[in-house]
Amino acid sequence: MKFLCALFFVLFAATTVPAQAASRAYTIFERAQAHWLGEKYPRNLNYIVAVSVQDGGKWKTEHYKSAYNAVTGTIHIDPVSDYQDAHPPSGRGINLSLFFFSVSKPTPPIDFLGVPKLAPTYTFGMAPFHPMIGRFQKSSAEVVAEIRKEYHDPFARPTPQPAATPLRIIAISTTTPRDYRITLRGVESLDGHTCYHLSLEPLHDPGRLRLRELWIDSTTYATIALREASNFITGPGTSVAWTVTFSHVGAARYIKDERAEDSIAYGGLIYTKAFVRFQNITAQRKAVHKNRFPMFVPLFLQEPPARIIPSP
């Protein structure tokens, strides 16, 4: 009898512990989503997007003056970078002819990866919208309603309806549609934070569900870093994985930088390394921007659009 009890305990523990670990991973992910929904951003932001690439062992950087309207989700950008102001294209390249062969050095693209039309508040699918401060801030009830609508109400329980013939209710169970299979890989230290390290495997539509790893602060559940299978919807950066880090500026969390995990080919050149950084983020009463010749931009570097919840 003791042997059977011990065997039952071992079998029960073997099935319960993995289930508890899986449940914990999903709980961490949901709390990280809730943390994003608690962020409050100013109505207007001014900032600079810096695009850096390593070409032939040399670093080159372009800075783009940008502005973001959190009410409409509109991004304004001056498509002429400081690098272009200092290095105007001449239209000339190097063309050497040797017998019947022509050796040409490709003319560098005007923009290294395309003009970055990006916002520092982007969440990479972690949250469906960004609450705003001031009169645009939503009430707690509105935020809860949006969470339940977006994430299929993972915490709600249906209210049983009385039947014509009363029956004994044994149990009520619900299922929650999931986009990822999430695994807790452990606890790690990153940028001074103790983080839960989550691994994500998309259960459908892997091209849209791009998250693969998350590092979540174990105390606040803020997203410290993430890795995605691909970045952007346009430009050469769509073909490689990227790692993204976040940091606080003032009272809100913004993207700090995005780093390509592999080399990128564009315009006949191969960039061995590439970074996108957000700098000088400031709140403004009115977005300040300058759109010089936007109709001549050959390529915008953009993310999939985030769903913006209209303000009442």
Image (spheres, rainbow, N blue to C red):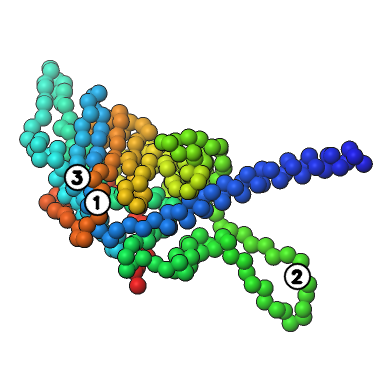
> Where's residue 220, x and y in %?
47, 48
Is 276 on the left or on the right of 206, as rendered?
A: left
Identify the residue at image location x=45%, y=54%.
35
The numbered mark, 1 or 3, whose residue comes first in the sequence reads 3
In the image, residue 55 sits, relative to residue 4, either above or below, namely above
Residue beneath disc 2: 169
Number of labels in the image equals 3
Residue 282, labelled with which disc?
1
Q: Secondary structure at mark 1?
A: strand
Between circles 1 and 3, the one closer to the viewer is 1
Tag nearer the camera, 2 or 1: 1
Instruction: Give the mark, 2 or 3, whose residue is nearer the N terminus.
Output: 3
Dot 3: few (<14), some (14–19), or many (≥20) neighbours within 10 Å?
Answer: many
Q: Nearer the viewer, residue 78 or 47?
A: 47
* Residue type of the residue flagged with mark 2: Ile
Earlier in the chain: of badge 2 and badge 1, it is 2
Image location (x, y in percent) of residue 227 = 43, 40
- Residue occupying the point 50% across, 60% down: 151
- Calculate the distance from the C-alpha at mark 1 to the C-alpha at mark 3: 15 Å
> Pointer 3: what residue?
64
From this viewpoint, is residue 73 visible?
no
Contact (Cβ within 8 Å) of mark 2 with mark 3: no
Q: Residue at x 70, y 79 (%)?
A: 162
**Mark 2: secondary structure:** loop
Mark 2 vs mark 1, CA separation in Å: 57 Å
